[in-house]
Image (cartoon, helix red, strand yellow):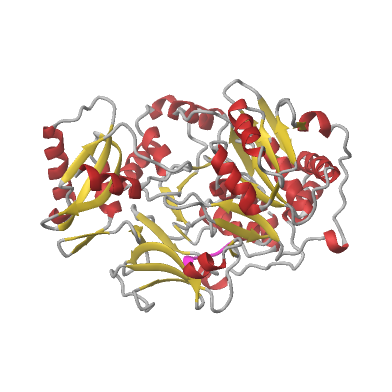
C-alpha cells in the first residue's frame, strides 16, 4: 500500500503506535499525481471503485481508469479558463463522476467545495458569494439545477454551470464535452504547480446555529486520512469498503476516497436516493463487502431487520462516526454479526483524532483513545489538564506544530478562527472525560450539557439509556426552563413501529432511565414526535428543540 511511503503501517501495540507513528509530508505533495496516478503506474488494473444504483446499473473503475478520466476532466476544466486557486462547488450526489472531478480539481490546484444537493437558493447564493465560486458542477436533476439557475440570476462571479449525467438547458454537458479532450495531463510546473500548503478543500460546516462556517484544508489533508483508513477502519490492499455518506459531506472525505486509496482499498459506492436498511444489507451481502462504516442512525435501522436473510461472512470490520453510538445498538449488532462496531471521532475540521484502534479493547459508549501525532488533551476552564473522571473540553494542542489533517482555519474569517484556535490550542467545543485507562467518553457539545438542580447531565448518557428500551427509535435529550429547578431534563422521542404514545409509556420510560442511570438524570418531560429536527447533514438540532420548549413549556 502507498501509505507505507509516508508512514509506518504496522505496530505491535497502541503504545508502539502512539510513540512511533509519524507522518511524512512532501513539500510538493498532490493527491491526484502522487496517489491516483502512482497507483495507476504500479497496479493499473487494480480496482479503485465499484459503483452501482438501485436500477441495476453498475460500473467498475481501475486506478488506470481513474487516471485517464481525471486527466480528461482536468483538460476540460482548463479549457473553461479554470485554474489553480479558483473555487468550484460540486453537487454530484453519489454519481461516479464526482471522483473524476475531485482528482482533476486536485491536479489543477482548484479549491474543491463539495456540497449537498439539498441546498436552497439562499444557501447557494451565500456559498457562491462567500467563497468566490467560479463554477458549479451538479447532477442533472431538476430539483437541483432549477434551484441553481434561480440563484445564478444575481451572481456575476459564477461563470460556468456544468451538468453531470444528463443535459440541462443553458448548462455545459460534461459527458458530451469530455470526449473532445485528451487523457494525458502532465503535472503542472512553475506558477501552476501545487505544493502541500496550497488550499485544497473547503467545507461549509452544517452548524445548528448561524450561517455555515468555511473550514478549509491544504494539500496535506489526504495524508491525515491514513490515520482514518488504515488505523481505524483497518483497510488494506484486499479491502472492499463502504462508507455511508453523500459526497457533499466531510464523511465522504473520511471514507470514500483519500485514506482508502492510500491503503490500496477498493471503494464501494451505492448511489441510492432513499435509505433502506434491507436494501443496504442486500448490497453488503451481494458484493461481499469487507468493511463498513455508517452513522449510528443507520445501525439503529439495520438491527431491526432479520440478519439471517443475508450472508455477511466476508464483513470483517464495522465502524461508526458522526454522533455517539448507543451501547444498546453496539450489543445488538454484535449479537447478529459477531462484529464489534468501532467508534471513531473527529470533525469537519479534522481527521480521526480519536478512535477504537485495533490494539485496544472496545468499550461500548467510548470514542476510544487519542490518535498518534495528535496532542489531544481534556482541560478545565483554566486550560489545565483534567484528572480521570473529570469532565472538560476536548482540545488539540498545536504549540509544537499543526498535526497533519487539522484544518487551516475558517476561510476569510480570522475572528471566528481565533475564537476556537488561539494560544496554541484548538478547542473542539466538545465536552468529554477520560477514564483511568485513557478511554475518552463523550458527554456532549459544550452548549448541550444540562445543569439541573446543581447537577450536570450529559445528554448522551440519558439518550443511551432511552435507546435500550425497544419502543425508542430515535431520541434527543435537552434541558428546558423550570421555575423550581432552573432547568430540567426533557426527552424528545421518535417511537419505533408498533408503539403508540401514552402517559403509561412516559412513566415506563422514566422508570427505565432511573434504573439504568442515576435517578436525578431521568427526563421529567417526554415528548413524542414523528421526526427530530436535523441539519441537512443529519445532525440533531438540539438548539431548535430547546428554543421550542421555551414557548411550549
Instruction: State left or right for residue 86 relative to residue 232.
Output: right
Q: Residue at x 27, y 57 (%)?
A: 458
Instruction: State left or right for residue 155 relative to residue 368.
Output: right
Observer-nearest of 320 and 235: 320
* Quadrant position of residue 469: top left
Check the image and report above or below for 287 versus 113. above
Q: Is residue 248 visible?
A: no
Residue 13 magenta-highlighted = yes
Q: Position of residue 39 (x, y in %)?
A: 76, 49
Which quadrant is home to the C terminus?
A: top left
Q: Position of residue 19 (x, y in %)?
A: 53, 73
Instruction: State left or right for residue 536 relative to residue 32.
Output: left
Q: Which residues are magenta?
A: 10-15
Observer-nearest of 453 and 318: 453
Q: Residue at x 64, y 31 (%)?
A: 145
Check the image and report above or below for 44 versus 284. below
Q: Residue furthest front?
A: 154
Observer-nearest of 390 and 302: 390
Instruction: State left or right for residue 315 relative to residue 238.
Output: left
* Quadrant position of residue 182: top right
Check the image and report above or below for 396 versus 540. below
Residue 166 magenta-highlighted = no
Q: Position of residue 267 (x, y in %)?
A: 62, 41
Observer-nearest of 159 and 35: 159
Q: Residue furthest top?
A: 55
Q: Position of residue 356 (x, y in %)?
A: 44, 57
Q: Residue at x 13, y 55 (%)?
A: 483
Q: Is residue 356 visible?
A: yes
Q: Residue at x 35, y 63 (%)?
A: 431
Amino acid at each position: 500500500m502507498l501509505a507505507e511511503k509516508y508512514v509506518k503501517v504496522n505496530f505491535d501495540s497502541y503504545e508502539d503506535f502512539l510513540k512511533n507513528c509519524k507522518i511524512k509530508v512532501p513539500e510538493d505533495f498532490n493527491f491526484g499525481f502522487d496517489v491516483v496516478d502512482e497507483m495507476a503506474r504500479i497496479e493499473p488494473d487494480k480496482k479503485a471503485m465499484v459503483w452501482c444504483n438501485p436500477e441495476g446499473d453498475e460500473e467498475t473503475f481501475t486506478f488506470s481508469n481513474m487516471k485517464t478520466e481525471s486527466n480528461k476532466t482536468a483538460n476540460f476544466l482548463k479549457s473553461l479558463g479554470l485554474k489553480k486557486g479558483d473555487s468550484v462547488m460540486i453537487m454530484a450526489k453519489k454519481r461516479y463522476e464526482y471522483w473524476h472531478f475531485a482528482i482533476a480539481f486536485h491536479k489543477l490546484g482548484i479549491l474543491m467545495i463539495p456540497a449537498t444537493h439539498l441546498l436552497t437558493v439562499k444557501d447557494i447564493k451565500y456559498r457562491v458569494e462567500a467563497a468566490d465560486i467560479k463554477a458549479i458542477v451538479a447532477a442533472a436533476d431538476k430539483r437541483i439545477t432549477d434551484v441553481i439557475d434561480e440563484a445564478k440570476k444575481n451572481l456575476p462571479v459564477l461563470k460556468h454551470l456544468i451538468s453531470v449525467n444528463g443535459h440541462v438547458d443553458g448548462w455545459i454537458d460534461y459527458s458530451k464535452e469530455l470526449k473532445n479532450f485528451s487523457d494525458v495531463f502532465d503535472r503542472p510546473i512553475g506558477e501552476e504547480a501545487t505544493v502541500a500548503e496550497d488550499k485544497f478543500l473547503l467545507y461549509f460546516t452544517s452548524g445548528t446555529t448561524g450561517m455555515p462556517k468555511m473550514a478549509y484544508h491544504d494539500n496535506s489533508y489526504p495524508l491525515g486520512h491514513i490515520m482514518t483508513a488504515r488505523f481505524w477502519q483497518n483497510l488494506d490492499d484486499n479491502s472492499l469498503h463502504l462508507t455511508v455518506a453523500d459526497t457533499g459531506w466531510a464523511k465522504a472525505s473520511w471514507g470514500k476516497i483519500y485514506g482508502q486509496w492510500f491503503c490500496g482499498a477498493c471503494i464501494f459506492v451505492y448511489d441510492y436516493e432513499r435509505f433502506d436498511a434491507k436494501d443496504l444489507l442486500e448490497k453488503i451481502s451481494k458484493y461481499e463487502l469487507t468493511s463498513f462504516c455508517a452513522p449510528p442512525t443507520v445501525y439503529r435501522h439495520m438491527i431491526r431487520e432479520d440478519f439471517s436473510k443475508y450472508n455477511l461472512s466476508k464483513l470483517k470490520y464495522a465502524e461508526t462516526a458522526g454522533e455517539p453510538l448507543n451501547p444498546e445498538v453496539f450489543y445488538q449488532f454484535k449479537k447478529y454479526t459477531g462484529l464489534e462496531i468501532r467508534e471513531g471521532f473527529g470533525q469537519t475540521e479534522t481527521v480521526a483524532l480519536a478512535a477504537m484502534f485495533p490494539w485496544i479493547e472496545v468499550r461500548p459508549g467510548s470514542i476510544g483513545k487519542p490518535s498518534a501525532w495528535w496532542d489531544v488533551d481534556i482541560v478545565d476552564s483554566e486550560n489545565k489538564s483534567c484528572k480521570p473522571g473529570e469532565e472538560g473540553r476536548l482540545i488539540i494542542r498545536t504549540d509544537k506544530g499543526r498535526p497533519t489533517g487539522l484544518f487551516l482555519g475558517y476561510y476569510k474569517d480570522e475572528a471566528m478562527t481565533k475564537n476556537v484556535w488561539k494560544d496554541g490550542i484548538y478547542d473542539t467545543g466538545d465536552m468529554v472525560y477520560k477514564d483511568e485507562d485513557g478511554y475518552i467518553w463523550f458527554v456532549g457539545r459544550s452548549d448541550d450539557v444540562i445543569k439541573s438542580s446543581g447537577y450536570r447531565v450529559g445528554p448522551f448518557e440519558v439518550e443511551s439509556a432511552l435507546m435500550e428500551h425497544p419502543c425508542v427509535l430515535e431520541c434527543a435529550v435537552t434541558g428546558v426552563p423550570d421555575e423550581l429547578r432552573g432547568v430540567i431534563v426533557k426527552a424528545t422521542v421518535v417511537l419505533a413501529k408498533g408503539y403508540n404514545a401514552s402517559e403509561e409509556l412516559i412513566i415506563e420510560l422514566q422508570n427505565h432511565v432511573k434504573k439504568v442511570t442515576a435517578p436525578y438524570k431521568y427526563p421529567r418531560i417526554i415528548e413524542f414526535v414523528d421526526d427530530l429536527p436535523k441539519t441537512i447533514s443529519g445532525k440533531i438540532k438540539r438548539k431548535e428543540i430547546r428554543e421550542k420548549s421555551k414557548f411550549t413549556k
